[in-house]
Amino acid sequence: MANRRDSRIEPSFEGPPRAKSSAGFSVSEEDRVVPSNRKTSAKRQSAKTKSSRRGRGKSRRGLFGVLGRLFYWCFVLAIWGGIATAGIVVYYGAKMPAATTWAIPDRAPNIRIVSVDGKLLANRGMSGGEAVGLHEMSTYIPEAVIAIEDRRFYSHLGIDPIGLSRAMVANVVGGRFSQGGSTLTQQLAKNLFLTPDRTLERKVQEVLLALWLEHKHTKDQILEMYLNRVYFGSGAYGVEAASRRYFGKSARDVTLPEAALLAGLLKAPSRLSPARDPKAAEQRSQLVLAAMRDEGKISAKELTTAMSAPATRVASYWTGSENYVADTIVEELPDLIGDVRSDIIVDTTVDLTLQKLAEQSIRRLIDGSGKKLNASQGVLVSIDNSGAVRAMVGGYDYSTSQFDRASEARRQPGSAFKPFVYMAALEAGRTPDSVRNDAPIRIGKWTPTNYGGKYFGKVTLATALAKSLNSVAAQLTMEVGPDAVVEAAHRMGIQSDLTANTSIALGTSEVTPLELTSAYVPFANGGYRPEVHFIRRVTTTGGKVLYDNNGGGAPRVVKPEIVGMMNSMMTGTVEIGTARKAAFAWPAAGKTGTSQNSRDAWFIGYTANLTTGVWFGNDDGSPMKKVTGGALPAQAWHEFMVAAHEGVPVRPLPGTWRSTPADTIVQDEIPSNTAQPAPVPSASVGQSAPSAQKASSPRAVRPAETIDGGGFGIPGGDSATASIKRPVPPGDVGGPVKKRQTSILDILTGG
């Protein structure tokens, strides 16, 4: 015990502090007179550690504070932004009509124009195509449109916040307005109700209308309305019009690559149209196909096949000669049914098969010989005996020129006008056997010359017409008077103003191909002038008849005996005269015509079924290279008429006339001196053939009580059937005729 008490306990400044006891003592670091370095170092380290801990705490508290304040102010701003947005919506919404008055506007009416056998010729109207149900069109079309334009179409409520946010980010990153974020419903609302202006007011109204559409209609109804109204470029509104425009088929038959092309156009219809930029349209369609694959709408195999499909090539405008017919019909409709207020169907008289035959014939001849002969345009018009237009080609290519030369261009008919001169002469008492002296004559300052400068001396009128002798036609015009010729032409169907001077004998007054062809129809049907028409019937899509052409009465304008004589003479033109290239297995007649310097070349010919007129020339009136009516026009006429009459029973031309035996022909008195009347305009036109014989074969008589419609493409039982019986007008046609002179001598003597 003593040892334990006596043992010394040294103070310690290191190690852990010991517990205090009553028996010992200890000294802390602070008891030192001079603090050790270790003390100072430890103190500093302790202070630094505490400071570091306080800094980290303050940093953490500062970061959370900033985030908290940011969140707070964003929340505040969001509230105020929502209030401001609501205020804007209320403001612009108040400017709109009451929602109870909102209604889907009627779709622009479509005019569906069909051929005589029900085939589509064209669609006309603002839409350019009929409406097609969603269940009727190719399923690829709605799938492609949704994939590229609005992937969440069937899940959103009219506006797509996700799509809108994505578009905003893309616009900010790209630094330009490249995406709009509008849903299909919003696009439909804009197309139906709003202008394309990019304003805040229009955008607000678009959203409100989109919500209303989603409330009132199902998704399928909205999609169907959209696809039938949206613009696809090149004048096509709706998928049907676009399909017809770009692919020549209905939207019902569109393939996968075609549907992708259509869907791709919606981004920029005018710029991406394959009619304008086929390459851009193809590139865009590839993106659509990829989007469809991403959405699982098509398989990898379908994608590969569609990607390898050739690019679509489209004419810059609607093509096909049937569009000339469609344009003419649209111009006539208001006079028949007034304003078009709903979709209608127009049944025409046009046979699409004949129409295509006519177009092919004109194009083939111009493609083959046009450049060599300097002929760039051609026209063909074909009319049956009831006045129904079966085919009308208004030019070489509708896609490059929509000007209808058949019904709008007035050109000099040349010798194709001579049948009216000879008809007036026959009505004044001449016959095909009457003789005139084909020799140079002078009428005032005008000296009509024959084509080629060749003269044949004394010839019958039948021979003179077959050879297209100008001097004889001029003599006959002087004998009967120009007024009589003008009256005969107008009576037959010419509507243009005609100048009553002697040069009219050679066709110096301008006419259209349509009216000149129609004026030959009475020769083909026995002397009646029917109303020339394109439209048989107009109905609504529901079947209500708005117009029906029942034919009406066709007045007799030529006596049967005159028809017989004219057909006998004009048959010679085809058999032995200037139109021998037109001859085929049917009895046919007609007349060629060539205006001065070959600016216009014509052949108007007919059978007992069809009257067809052909013209070749240039729009600027420049001369062709020695093209006559017996060349290109007669060739085109031959090609068309052979095809048109295939399988149709042969029928003779109407009327009859038997020539007088040669030894009993009495020659009309012809003065020995030429006439010197008042000056008339100069002209030197017409044609001649190297040889000819007198056309004296008799023609079969045909009953004058019936007018044949031709029997081409008219379904049995239709109102426009091949044989149309009509009341026979009195035989004294044309009314009293002005006094006609009998010869040039009578004109000189005033007798």
Image (spheres, rainbow, N blue to C red):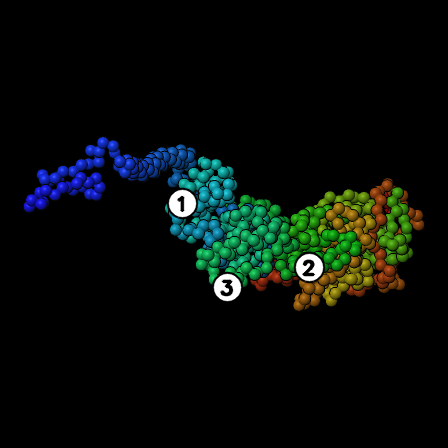
Mark positioned earlier in the residue sequence (2 or 1): 1
Q: Which residue is mark 2?
A: 360
Q: Which one is in front, 509 or 465?
A: 509
Label 2 secondary element: helix
Q: Residue furthest left?
A: 1
Q: Residue furthest top?
A: 33
Compute the Cα span from label 2 to label 1: 56 Å
Q: Which one is in front, 201 or 16?
A: 16
* Number of other residues with Cα within 10 Å of mark 2, as a class: few under 14, some 14 to 19, many 20 or more: some
Q: Residue at x 75, y 44 (%)?
A: 498
Q: Which residue is mark 1?
A: 161
Q: Amino acid at mark 1?
A: Pro
Camera-side mark, 3 or 2: 3
Compute the Cα span from label 3 to label 2: 40 Å
Q: Is residue 745 visible?
A: no
Mark positioned earlier in the residue sequence (3 or 2): 3
Q: Residue at x 77, y 54 (%)?
A: 371
Using the rendered view, name the quadrant where residue 7 is placed.
top left
Quick check: 714 above or below 231?
A: below
Camera-side mark, 2 or 1: 1
Q: Residue at x 93, y 50 (%)?
A: 672
Q: Which one is in front, 134 or 335?
A: 134
Total marks in image: 3
Q: Amino acid at mark 3?
A: Lys
Mark positioned earlier in the residue sequence (3 or 1): 1
Q: Which residue is mark 3?
A: 301
